[in-house]
């Protein structure tokens, strides 16, 4: 299912989002600067999910396609190792046939001079969430049979204000 938003509505939606986050300065001139991301598979997923600087929505499908390429054929222990190496976390799901893993990635915006205000700067981020299902959870070598992928948008904002006088 796809949601189509006309250009006139995109500006309105962006304005609503900007007012909902008054402590964060996000300019339409902002560009993603992914240079601080680790050089790993998850960085590629972030870049595909976030897309260009003017995209307002995450592209979950692109992230799922890229992720499937590097998790294919892995068992639960290999998946845990992959996420641990990327400073992620994996925990058992609701039952022994599930493994839930998350990894957070943070980047920055390369802002235009007019939008650069260190008192209001936000560091954007994203949490990649994976839920793996195993048909044979009691067999250590069994690989996942299905997985779900989702993302959560994160932001860490510097909210310090300088009081006059």
Image (cartoon, rainbow, N blue to C red):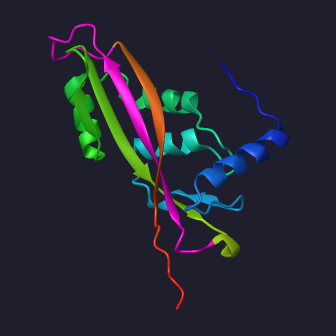
Query: Which span of residues is magenta-colored?
Result: 116-144
Name the residue rendered at 46%, 30% in the picture.
150
Give the left or right position of residue 112, taking residue 73 as reference: right
**How many marks do you count on the picture?**
0
Give the left or right position of residue 107, taking residue 90 as reference: right
Q: Position of residue 135 (x, y in %)?
A: 27, 7
* Nearer to us in this view, 83 or 155: 155
| Placement of the N terminus among the 4 image quadrants | top right
Instruction: Let me know if residue 138 is in the magenta part.
Output: yes
Give the left or right position of residue 73, taking residue 92 as reference: right
Name the residue rendered at 25%, 18% in the picture.
94
Give the left or right position of residue 151, taking residue 78 as reference: right
Q: Position of residue 40 (x, y in %)?
A: 39, 47
Q: Quadrant of residue 148?
A: top left
Name the residue rendered at 37%, 28% in the picture.
130
Outermost residue to the front? 165
* Nearer to us in this view, 50 or 145: 50
Q: Quadrant of residue 21?
A: bottom right
* Nearer to us in this view, 56 or 74: 56
Residue 121, relative to residue 98: is it above or below?
below
Residue 140, relative to residue 39: is it above or below?
above
Q: Position of residue 13 (x, y in %)?
A: 72, 43
Q: Quadrant of residue 30?
A: bottom right
Outermost residue to the bottom? 165
Residue 62, relative to residue 51: is it above or below?
above
């Amino acid at each position: 299912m796809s949601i189509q938003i006309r250009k006139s509505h995109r500006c309105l939606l962006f304005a609503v989002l900007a007012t909902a986050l008054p402590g964060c300065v996000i300019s339409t001139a902002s560009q993603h600067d992914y240079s601080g991301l680790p050089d790993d598979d998850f960085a590629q997923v972030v870049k595909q999910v976030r897309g260009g600087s003017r995209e307002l929505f995450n592209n979950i499908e692109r992230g799922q396609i890229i992720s499937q390429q590097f998790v294919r054929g892995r068992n639960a222990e290999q998946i845990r190792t992959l996420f641990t190496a990327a400073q992620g976390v994996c925990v058992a799901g609701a039952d022994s046939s599930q493994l839930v893993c998350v990894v957070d990635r943070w980047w920055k915006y390369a802002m235009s001079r007019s939008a650069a205000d260190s008192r209001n700067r936000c560091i954007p981020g994203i949490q990649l969430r994976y839920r793996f299902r195993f048909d044979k959870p009691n067999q250590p070598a069994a690989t996942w049979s299905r997985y779900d992928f989702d993302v959560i948008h994160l932001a860490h904002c510097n909210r310090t204000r300088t009081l006059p006088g």
